[in-house]
Image (cartoon, rainbow, N blue to C red):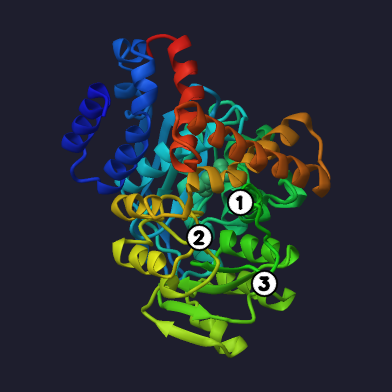
Amino acid sequence: MNAYVERVIENVKAKHASEPEFVQTIEEVLSSLSPVIDKHPEYEKVDLLGRIVEPERMFTFRVVWMDDNGNYHTNTGYRCQFNGAIGPYKGGLRFQKNVYPGIIKFLGFEQIFKNALTGLPIGGGKGGSDFDPTGKSDAEIMRFCQSFMTALYRYIGPDVDVPAGDMGVGGREIGFLFGQYRRLKGAWENGVLTGKGQTYGGSVIRPEATGYGAVYYLNEVLKHEHDDIKGKTIACSGFGNVTWGICKKAMQLGAKVVTLSGPDGYIYDPEGVATEEKVNYLLEMRASNRNRVQDYSDKFGCEFFPGEKPWGRKVDIIMPSAMQNDVRMESAEKIAANHIKYYIEVANMPTTNDALDFLRHQDGMIVAPSKAVNAGGVGVSALEMAQNSERLVWTADEVDNQLHRMMETIHRVSAEAAEEYGLGYDLVAGANIAGFKKVATAMYEQGAF
Ligand code: 2IT
Protein backbone atom coordinates (compact mmCIF):
# COMPACT_ATOMS: atom_id res chain seq x y z
CA MET A 1 0.00 0.00 0.00
CA ASN A 2 1.10 3.58 -0.64
CA ALA A 3 3.13 4.80 2.38
CA TYR A 4 1.23 8.07 2.73
CA VAL A 5 -2.11 6.25 2.70
CA GLU A 6 -0.82 3.86 5.33
CA ARG A 7 0.39 6.71 7.54
CA VAL A 8 -2.97 8.52 7.40
CA ILE A 9 -4.82 5.30 8.29
CA GLU A 10 -2.46 4.70 11.23
CA ASN A 11 -2.99 8.27 12.47
CA VAL A 12 -6.77 7.87 12.31
CA LYS A 13 -6.59 4.56 14.18
CA ALA A 14 -4.50 6.11 16.94
CA LYS A 15 -6.59 9.25 17.22
CA HIS A 16 -10.05 7.64 16.98
CA ALA A 17 -9.58 4.38 18.87
CA SER A 18 -12.88 4.95 20.67
CA GLU A 19 -14.79 5.36 17.37
CA PRO A 20 -14.50 1.96 15.65
CA GLU A 21 -17.12 2.64 12.95
CA PHE A 22 -15.22 5.75 11.86
CA VAL A 23 -11.91 3.88 11.73
CA GLN A 24 -13.66 1.13 9.74
CA THR A 25 -14.87 3.44 6.97
CA ILE A 26 -11.52 5.25 6.79
CA GLU A 27 -9.67 1.95 6.33
CA GLU A 28 -12.13 0.72 3.74
CA VAL A 29 -12.12 3.89 1.62
CA LEU A 30 -8.48 4.91 1.91
CA SER A 31 -7.14 1.45 1.09
CA SER A 32 -8.97 1.70 -2.27
CA LEU A 33 -7.24 5.00 -2.97
CA SER A 34 -3.68 3.71 -2.87
CA PRO A 35 -3.25 3.57 -6.68
CA VAL A 36 -4.73 7.06 -7.05
CA ILE A 37 -2.26 8.50 -4.54
CA ASP A 38 0.59 6.69 -6.33
CA LYS A 39 -0.45 8.54 -9.46
CA HIS A 40 -0.88 11.91 -7.70
CA PRO A 41 2.15 12.54 -5.48
CA GLU A 42 1.13 16.22 -5.31
CA TYR A 43 -1.73 15.20 -2.99
CA GLU A 44 0.72 14.22 -0.28
CA LYS A 45 2.45 17.59 -0.44
CA VAL A 46 -0.84 19.36 0.36
CA ASP A 47 -1.80 16.66 2.88
CA LEU A 48 -5.02 16.00 1.02
CA LEU A 49 -5.78 12.73 2.83
CA GLY A 50 -4.96 14.14 6.26
CA ARG A 51 -7.47 16.87 5.49
CA ILE A 52 -10.21 14.70 4.02
CA VAL A 53 -10.40 12.53 7.15
CA GLU A 54 -10.87 15.59 9.39
CA PRO A 55 -14.39 17.08 9.48
CA GLU A 56 -14.48 20.75 8.52
CA ARG A 57 -16.71 21.32 11.53
CA MET A 58 -18.62 19.17 14.00
CA PHE A 59 -20.73 20.15 16.94
CA THR A 60 -22.88 18.67 19.67
CA PHE A 61 -25.79 20.29 21.41
CA ARG A 62 -28.18 19.66 24.27
CA VAL A 63 -31.75 18.67 23.41
CA VAL A 64 -34.24 18.81 26.28
CA TRP A 65 -37.82 17.72 25.74
CA MET A 66 -40.89 16.89 27.81
CA ASP A 67 -42.70 13.54 27.61
CA ASP A 68 -46.49 13.11 27.76
CA ASN A 69 -46.38 12.76 31.56
CA GLY A 70 -44.61 16.07 32.04
CA ASN A 71 -41.18 14.54 32.74
CA TYR A 72 -38.08 16.16 31.22
CA HIS A 73 -35.45 14.23 29.24
CA THR A 74 -32.04 15.27 27.98
CA ASN A 75 -30.42 13.95 24.80
CA THR A 76 -27.35 14.89 22.78
CA GLY A 77 -27.73 16.27 19.26
CA TYR A 78 -24.95 16.20 16.62
CA ARG A 79 -24.16 17.71 13.27
CA CYS A 80 -20.99 16.92 11.38
CA GLN A 81 -20.21 19.24 8.43
CA PHE A 82 -17.62 16.94 7.00
CA ASN A 83 -16.70 18.29 3.59
CA GLY A 84 -18.12 21.25 1.68
CA ALA A 85 -15.69 21.36 -1.24
CA ILE A 86 -18.26 20.54 -3.94
CA GLY A 87 -21.45 22.01 -2.44
CA PRO A 88 -23.42 22.76 0.72
CA TYR A 89 -23.15 20.02 3.33
CA LYS A 90 -25.87 17.47 2.69
CA GLY A 91 -26.89 14.39 4.60
CA GLY A 92 -29.45 12.89 6.89
CA LEU A 93 -30.26 13.01 10.58
CA ARG A 94 -30.36 9.72 12.47
CA PHE A 95 -32.38 9.36 15.66
CA GLN A 96 -31.40 6.10 17.34
CA LYS A 97 -30.31 5.30 20.87
CA ASN A 98 -26.85 4.05 19.82
CA VAL A 99 -25.90 7.34 18.10
CA TYR A 100 -22.53 8.77 19.22
CA PRO A 101 -19.78 10.69 17.40
CA GLY A 102 -18.28 7.54 15.83
CA ILE A 103 -21.58 6.79 14.05
CA ILE A 104 -22.15 10.36 12.90
CA LYS A 105 -18.58 10.59 11.57
CA PHE A 106 -18.65 7.30 9.69
CA LEU A 107 -21.93 8.31 8.08
CA GLY A 108 -20.59 11.79 7.29
CA PHE A 109 -17.45 10.39 5.70
CA GLU A 110 -19.40 7.94 3.52
CA GLN A 111 -21.71 10.78 2.54
CA ILE A 112 -18.85 12.81 1.00
CA PHE A 113 -18.13 10.14 -1.61
CA LYS A 114 -21.74 9.15 -2.15
CA ASN A 115 -22.78 12.74 -2.77
CA ALA A 116 -19.90 13.23 -5.20
CA LEU A 117 -21.05 10.12 -7.10
CA THR A 118 -24.50 11.62 -7.69
CA GLY A 119 -22.82 14.11 -10.03
CA LEU A 120 -24.65 16.96 -8.27
CA PRO A 121 -23.12 19.80 -6.23
CA ILE A 122 -23.57 18.57 -2.66
CA GLY A 123 -20.97 18.25 0.09
CA GLY A 124 -20.98 15.63 2.84
CA GLY A 125 -22.62 15.99 6.25
CA LYS A 126 -24.56 13.98 8.80
CA GLY A 127 -26.26 14.51 12.12
CA GLY A 128 -28.67 13.06 14.60
CA SER A 129 -29.24 12.26 18.21
CA ASP A 130 -29.18 9.41 20.73
CA PHE A 131 -32.95 9.95 21.11
CA ASP A 132 -34.81 6.61 20.85
CA PRO A 133 -38.10 6.98 18.93
CA THR A 134 -39.29 3.47 19.92
CA GLY A 135 -42.61 3.70 21.74
CA LYS A 136 -42.81 7.51 21.60
CA SER A 137 -46.09 9.28 20.84
CA ASP A 138 -46.45 11.76 17.97
CA ALA A 139 -46.59 14.60 20.49
CA GLU A 140 -43.35 13.48 22.11
CA ILE A 141 -41.66 13.21 18.73
CA MET A 142 -42.88 16.69 17.83
CA ARG A 143 -41.53 18.21 21.04
CA PHE A 144 -38.21 16.46 20.56
CA CYS A 145 -37.91 17.65 16.93
CA GLN A 146 -38.80 21.23 17.87
CA SER A 147 -36.17 21.27 20.59
CA PHE A 148 -33.60 19.69 18.27
CA MET A 149 -34.20 22.30 15.57
CA THR A 150 -34.12 25.17 18.07
CA ALA A 151 -30.54 24.17 18.82
CA LEU A 152 -29.54 23.52 15.20
CA TYR A 153 -31.24 26.18 13.07
CA ARG A 154 -28.49 28.84 13.25
CA TYR A 155 -25.96 26.50 11.70
CA ILE A 156 -27.87 25.23 8.65
CA GLY A 157 -29.45 26.84 5.59
CA PRO A 158 -29.99 26.23 1.88
CA ASP A 159 -26.46 27.40 0.94
CA VAL A 160 -24.83 26.08 4.10
CA ASP A 161 -26.11 22.70 5.19
CA VAL A 162 -29.26 20.85 4.12
CA PRO A 163 -30.29 18.01 6.46
CA ALA A 164 -32.70 15.20 5.59
CA GLY A 165 -33.89 11.94 7.10
CA ASP A 166 -32.08 8.75 8.03
CA MET A 167 -33.01 5.99 10.50
CA GLY A 168 -35.69 7.26 12.88
CA VAL A 169 -36.29 10.38 10.80
CA GLY A 170 -38.98 10.15 8.11
CA GLY A 171 -41.65 12.43 6.70
CA ARG A 172 -43.30 13.05 10.07
CA GLU A 173 -40.05 14.14 11.74
CA ILE A 174 -38.97 16.27 8.77
CA GLY A 175 -42.35 18.04 8.96
CA PHE A 176 -41.87 18.92 12.64
CA LEU A 177 -38.25 19.97 12.05
CA PHE A 178 -39.17 22.15 9.07
CA GLY A 179 -42.11 23.73 10.90
CA GLN A 180 -39.83 24.76 13.74
CA TYR A 181 -37.16 26.10 11.37
CA ARG A 182 -39.74 28.23 9.59
CA ARG A 183 -41.14 29.48 12.87
CA LEU A 184 -37.70 30.51 14.13
CA LYS A 185 -36.50 32.13 10.89
CA GLY A 186 -39.80 33.58 9.74
CA ALA A 187 -38.89 32.48 6.23
CA TRP A 188 -39.42 29.52 3.96
CA GLU A 189 -35.79 29.65 2.78
CA ASN A 190 -35.92 27.32 -0.19
CA GLY A 191 -37.06 24.43 1.88
CA VAL A 192 -33.83 24.02 3.92
CA LEU A 193 -34.53 20.34 4.58
CA THR A 194 -35.22 17.60 2.07
CA GLY A 195 -37.68 14.76 2.36
CA LYS A 196 -40.43 17.28 3.05
CA GLY A 197 -44.10 16.53 2.48
CA GLN A 198 -45.37 17.13 -1.03
CA THR A 199 -47.67 19.98 -0.03
CA TYR A 200 -44.71 22.09 1.15
CA GLY A 201 -41.87 21.60 -1.30
CA GLY A 202 -41.10 17.91 -1.00
CA SER A 203 -40.21 16.10 -4.20
CA VAL A 204 -42.28 13.31 -5.64
CA ILE A 205 -40.37 10.00 -5.56
CA ARG A 206 -38.10 11.14 -2.68
CA PRO A 207 -39.65 8.58 -0.27
CA GLU A 208 -39.11 5.82 -2.85
CA ALA A 209 -35.78 7.11 -4.19
CA THR A 210 -33.27 5.15 -2.11
CA GLY A 211 -34.98 1.80 -2.71
CA TYR A 212 -35.82 2.51 -6.37
CA GLY A 213 -32.28 3.72 -7.00
CA ALA A 214 -30.86 0.56 -5.40
CA VAL A 215 -32.94 -1.63 -7.72
CA TYR A 216 -31.95 0.48 -10.75
CA TYR A 217 -28.32 0.00 -9.79
CA LEU A 218 -28.88 -3.74 -9.29
CA ASN A 219 -30.39 -3.82 -12.77
CA GLU A 220 -27.21 -2.30 -14.22
CA VAL A 221 -25.16 -5.03 -12.54
CA LEU A 222 -27.51 -7.69 -13.93
CA LYS A 223 -27.26 -6.17 -17.42
CA HIS A 224 -23.47 -6.24 -17.14
CA GLU A 225 -23.78 -9.97 -16.41
CA HIS A 226 -26.32 -10.51 -19.23
CA ASP A 227 -28.80 -11.54 -16.56
CA ASP A 228 -32.44 -10.55 -15.96
CA ILE A 229 -34.20 -9.30 -12.82
CA LYS A 230 -37.46 -11.12 -13.66
CA GLY A 231 -38.15 -14.00 -11.30
CA LYS A 232 -35.23 -13.23 -8.99
CA THR A 233 -35.55 -13.67 -5.21
CA ILE A 234 -34.02 -11.06 -2.93
CA ALA A 235 -33.15 -11.25 0.77
CA CYS A 236 -33.42 -7.83 2.40
CA SER A 237 -32.94 -6.75 5.97
CA GLY A 238 -34.83 -3.95 7.71
CA PHE A 239 -38.43 -3.00 7.03
CA GLY A 240 -38.15 0.79 6.91
CA ASN A 241 -38.27 3.35 4.15
CA VAL A 242 -35.39 1.92 2.11
CA THR A 243 -36.56 -1.70 2.22
CA TRP A 244 -40.08 -0.52 1.36
CA GLY A 245 -38.77 1.17 -1.82
CA ILE A 246 -36.85 -1.96 -2.81
CA CYS A 247 -39.94 -4.18 -2.33
CA LYS A 248 -42.06 -1.82 -4.43
CA LYS A 249 -39.65 -1.51 -7.36
CA ALA A 250 -38.72 -5.22 -7.27
CA MET A 251 -42.43 -6.08 -7.46
CA GLN A 252 -42.89 -3.76 -10.48
CA LEU A 253 -39.98 -5.43 -12.27
CA GLY A 254 -41.09 -9.00 -11.54
CA ALA A 255 -38.66 -9.86 -8.73
CA LYS A 256 -39.61 -10.54 -5.13
CA VAL A 257 -38.21 -9.69 -1.72
CA VAL A 258 -38.61 -12.76 0.50
CA THR A 259 -37.06 -11.65 3.81
CA LEU A 260 -37.36 -8.62 6.08
CA SER A 261 -35.77 -8.10 9.46
CA GLY A 262 -35.99 -6.03 12.61
CA PRO A 263 -34.30 -5.91 16.00
CA ASP A 264 -36.55 -8.85 16.99
CA GLY A 265 -35.54 -11.27 14.18
CA TYR A 266 -36.44 -11.91 10.56
CA ILE A 267 -39.44 -13.06 8.54
CA TYR A 268 -39.43 -15.37 5.51
CA ASP A 269 -42.26 -14.87 3.03
CA PRO A 270 -41.74 -17.25 0.09
CA GLU A 271 -44.57 -15.53 -1.82
CA GLY A 272 -42.62 -12.29 -1.59
CA VAL A 273 -43.43 -8.90 -0.11
CA ALA A 274 -45.00 -8.41 -3.47
CA THR A 275 -48.59 -7.24 -3.16
CA GLU A 276 -49.72 -3.67 -2.66
CA GLU A 277 -51.22 -4.61 0.71
CA LYS A 278 -47.98 -6.11 1.99
CA VAL A 279 -45.84 -3.26 0.73
CA ASN A 280 -48.16 -0.67 2.27
CA TYR A 281 -48.16 -2.54 5.56
CA LEU A 282 -44.44 -1.74 5.94
CA LEU A 283 -45.43 1.93 6.18
CA GLU A 284 -47.86 1.13 8.98
CA MET A 285 -45.19 -0.84 10.82
CA ARG A 286 -42.84 2.13 10.66
CA ALA A 287 -45.53 4.65 11.71
CA SER A 288 -46.43 2.52 14.75
CA ASN A 289 -42.95 3.09 16.29
CA ARG A 290 -43.07 -0.49 17.58
CA ASN A 291 -39.88 -1.46 15.72
CA ARG A 292 -40.99 -5.12 15.38
CA VAL A 293 -40.89 -7.19 12.19
CA GLN A 294 -42.91 -9.98 13.79
CA ASP A 295 -45.97 -7.80 13.18
CA TYR A 296 -45.60 -8.71 9.48
CA SER A 297 -45.63 -12.48 10.04
CA ASP A 298 -48.56 -12.12 12.49
CA LYS A 299 -50.53 -10.31 9.81
CA PHE A 300 -49.63 -12.35 6.73
CA GLY A 301 -49.06 -15.75 8.33
CA CYS A 302 -45.50 -16.49 7.31
CA GLU A 303 -42.57 -17.78 9.34
CA PHE A 304 -40.77 -15.61 11.89
CA PHE A 305 -37.27 -16.43 13.19
CA PRO A 306 -36.69 -14.65 16.50
CA GLY A 307 -33.21 -13.26 17.08
CA GLU A 308 -31.92 -14.44 13.68
CA LYS A 309 -30.63 -12.74 10.55
CA PRO A 310 -31.80 -13.72 7.04
CA TRP A 311 -28.32 -14.28 5.55
CA GLY A 312 -28.44 -18.06 5.61
CA ARG A 313 -31.33 -18.11 3.10
CA LYS A 314 -30.60 -19.35 -0.40
CA VAL A 315 -31.75 -16.55 -2.71
CA ASP A 316 -30.50 -14.97 -5.92
CA ILE A 317 -29.60 -11.58 -4.50
CA ILE A 318 -28.65 -10.28 -1.06
CA MET A 319 -29.47 -6.65 -0.24
CA PRO A 320 -28.61 -5.72 3.37
CA SER A 321 -30.74 -2.63 3.84
CA ALA A 322 -31.03 -2.18 7.60
CA MET A 323 -27.94 -0.72 9.27
CA GLN A 324 -24.15 -0.83 9.70
CA ASN A 325 -22.32 -4.10 10.43
CA ASP A 326 -25.40 -6.22 9.79
CA VAL A 327 -23.31 -8.76 7.85
CA ARG A 328 -20.33 -10.09 9.79
CA MET A 329 -17.93 -12.91 8.97
CA GLU A 330 -20.26 -15.73 10.09
CA SER A 331 -23.03 -14.43 7.80
CA ALA A 332 -20.58 -13.83 4.95
CA GLU A 333 -19.50 -17.47 5.16
CA LYS A 334 -23.12 -18.62 4.83
CA ILE A 335 -23.62 -16.33 1.83
CA ALA A 336 -20.52 -17.77 0.14
CA ALA A 337 -21.54 -21.34 0.98
CA ASN A 338 -24.86 -20.71 -0.73
CA HIS A 339 -23.01 -19.51 -3.87
CA ILE A 340 -25.02 -16.32 -4.06
CA LYS A 341 -23.85 -14.31 -7.03
CA TYR A 342 -25.07 -10.81 -6.21
CA TYR A 343 -24.18 -9.09 -2.96
CA ILE A 344 -25.60 -5.58 -3.23
CA GLU A 345 -25.04 -3.42 -0.16
CA VAL A 346 -27.78 -0.88 0.47
CA ALA A 347 -27.60 0.37 4.08
CA ASN A 348 -24.60 2.52 4.95
CA MET A 349 -21.61 0.23 5.69
CA PRO A 350 -23.72 -2.92 6.24
CA THR A 351 -20.69 -5.21 6.03
CA THR A 352 -17.73 -5.41 8.43
CA ASN A 353 -14.38 -4.91 6.66
CA ASP A 354 -13.26 -8.53 7.12
CA ALA A 355 -16.57 -9.83 5.76
CA LEU A 356 -16.45 -7.39 2.84
CA ASP A 357 -12.89 -8.46 1.94
CA PHE A 358 -13.94 -12.09 2.14
CA LEU A 359 -16.97 -11.59 -0.12
CA ARG A 360 -14.99 -9.52 -2.65
CA HIS A 361 -12.61 -12.43 -3.03
CA GLN A 362 -15.25 -15.09 -3.69
CA ASP A 363 -15.07 -16.46 -7.20
CA GLY A 364 -18.05 -15.42 -9.27
CA MET A 365 -19.53 -13.13 -6.63
CA ILE A 366 -20.27 -9.52 -7.48
CA VAL A 367 -20.15 -7.05 -4.63
CA ALA A 368 -21.63 -3.57 -4.98
CA PRO A 369 -20.96 -0.90 -2.34
CA SER A 370 -23.66 1.01 -0.50
CA LYS A 371 -22.21 4.44 -1.17
CA ALA A 372 -23.03 3.89 -4.85
CA VAL A 373 -26.13 1.71 -4.50
CA ASN A 374 -28.01 3.98 -2.06
CA ALA A 375 -26.94 7.29 -3.63
CA GLY A 376 -30.31 7.73 -5.35
CA GLY A 377 -31.82 8.86 -2.05
CA VAL A 378 -29.56 11.83 -1.58
CA GLY A 379 -29.54 12.32 -5.36
CA VAL A 380 -33.28 12.96 -5.35
CA SER A 381 -32.78 15.16 -2.28
CA ALA A 382 -30.55 17.30 -4.50
CA LEU A 383 -33.34 17.32 -7.09
CA GLU A 384 -35.69 18.51 -4.34
CA MET A 385 -33.28 21.37 -3.60
CA ALA A 386 -33.21 22.24 -7.30
CA GLN A 387 -37.02 22.29 -7.51
CA ASN A 388 -37.29 24.45 -4.37
CA SER A 389 -34.82 27.02 -5.65
CA GLU A 390 -36.52 27.10 -9.05
CA ARG A 391 -39.93 27.41 -7.33
CA LEU A 392 -41.08 24.58 -9.57
CA VAL A 393 -42.52 21.13 -9.08
CA TRP A 394 -41.36 18.38 -11.40
CA THR A 395 -43.55 15.43 -12.36
CA ALA A 396 -43.00 11.91 -11.06
CA ASP A 397 -41.81 10.84 -14.51
CA GLU A 398 -39.25 13.64 -14.66
CA VAL A 399 -37.82 12.80 -11.24
CA ASP A 400 -37.90 9.04 -11.81
CA ASN A 401 -36.17 9.38 -15.18
CA GLN A 402 -33.44 11.53 -13.66
CA LEU A 403 -33.02 9.04 -10.83
CA HIS A 404 -32.78 6.18 -13.30
CA ARG A 405 -30.16 8.00 -15.38
CA MET A 406 -28.24 8.94 -12.24
CA MET A 407 -27.98 5.32 -11.14
CA GLU A 408 -26.87 4.19 -14.61
CA THR A 409 -24.18 6.86 -14.54
CA ILE A 410 -22.99 5.96 -11.03
CA HIS A 411 -22.63 2.33 -12.05
CA ARG A 412 -20.82 3.26 -15.25
CA VAL A 413 -18.36 5.77 -13.73
CA SER A 414 -17.56 3.32 -10.91
CA ALA A 415 -16.84 0.53 -13.38
CA GLU A 416 -14.76 2.90 -15.53
CA ALA A 417 -12.72 4.17 -12.57
CA ALA A 418 -11.86 0.60 -11.56
CA GLU A 419 -10.98 -0.21 -15.16
CA GLU A 420 -8.73 2.85 -15.39
CA TYR A 421 -6.64 1.51 -12.50
CA GLY A 422 -6.51 -2.01 -13.87
CA LEU A 423 -8.86 -3.42 -11.23
CA GLY A 424 -11.41 -5.05 -13.53
CA TYR A 425 -15.10 -4.96 -12.59
CA ASP A 426 -14.44 -3.88 -8.99
CA LEU A 427 -17.44 -1.73 -8.08
CA VAL A 428 -16.25 -1.20 -4.49
CA ALA A 429 -12.88 0.30 -5.39
CA GLY A 430 -14.40 2.04 -8.42
CA ALA A 431 -16.96 3.94 -6.33
CA ASN A 432 -14.33 5.06 -3.84
CA ILE A 433 -12.00 6.19 -6.60
CA ALA A 434 -14.64 7.99 -8.68
CA GLY A 435 -16.05 9.83 -5.65
CA PHE A 436 -12.59 10.72 -4.37
CA LYS A 437 -11.34 12.07 -7.70
CA LYS A 438 -14.04 14.71 -7.82
CA VAL A 439 -13.70 15.85 -4.21
CA ALA A 440 -9.89 15.72 -4.27
CA THR A 441 -9.74 17.86 -7.41
CA ALA A 442 -12.10 20.43 -5.85
CA MET A 443 -10.07 20.52 -2.61
CA TYR A 444 -6.78 20.79 -4.47
CA GLU A 445 -8.01 23.65 -6.61
CA GLN A 446 -9.40 25.54 -3.60
CA GLY A 447 -6.06 25.64 -1.77
CA ALA A 448 -5.29 25.24 1.92
CA PHE A 449 -8.60 24.59 3.72
O1 2IT B 1 -27.65 8.10 3.92
C1 2IT B 1 -28.21 8.94 3.19
O2 2IT B 1 -27.78 9.19 2.06
C2 2IT B 1 -29.39 9.63 3.69
N1 2IT B 1 -29.78 9.36 4.82
C3 2IT B 1 -30.13 10.63 2.85
C4 2IT B 1 -29.43 11.94 2.86
C5 2IT B 1 -30.18 13.05 2.15
O3 2IT B 1 -29.71 14.19 2.29
O4 2IT B 1 -31.18 12.82 1.47
Give the residue type at disc 1. Glu
Q: Nearer the viewer, residue 389 or 74?
A: 389
Give the residue type at disc 2. Lys
Residue 302: x and y, percent?
56, 88
Q: CA distance from mark 2 to mark 1?
A: 10 Å
Q: Which residue is mark 2?
A: 341
Other residues around mark 3 within 10 Å, as few (<14) / some (14–19) / many (≥20): many
Q: Which residue is mark 1?
A: 225
Q: Residue at x 44, y 20 (%)?
A: 440
Q: Residue at x 59, y 42 (%)?
A: 378
- Which of the two discs, 3 and 2, sits closer to the camera? 2
Q: CA distance from mark 3 to mark 1?
A: 29 Å
**Residue furthest toward the left?**
14
* Quarter of the rendering occupied by the N terminus: top left
Secondary-structure class at tag 1:
loop
Pointer 2 and pointer 1: residues touching (CB < 8 Å)? yes
Secondary-structure class at tag 3:
helix
Q: Nearer the viewer, residue 144 or 352?
A: 352
> Mark 2 or mark 1, which has the lower sequence index?
1
Q: Residue at x 27, y 41 (%)?
A: 23
Q: Residue at x 66, y 41 (%)?
A: 408
Other residues around mark 2 within 10 Å, as few (<14) / some (14–19) / many (≥20): some
Residue 200: x and y, percent?
73, 46
> Mark 3 or mark 2, which has the lower sequence index?
3
Residue 350: x and y, percent?
41, 55
* Quarter of the rendering occupied by the C terminus: top left
Let me know if residue 154 appears in the view. no
Q: Which residue is mark 3?
A: 279
Q: Left or right? Give the position of 369 relative to 130.
A: right
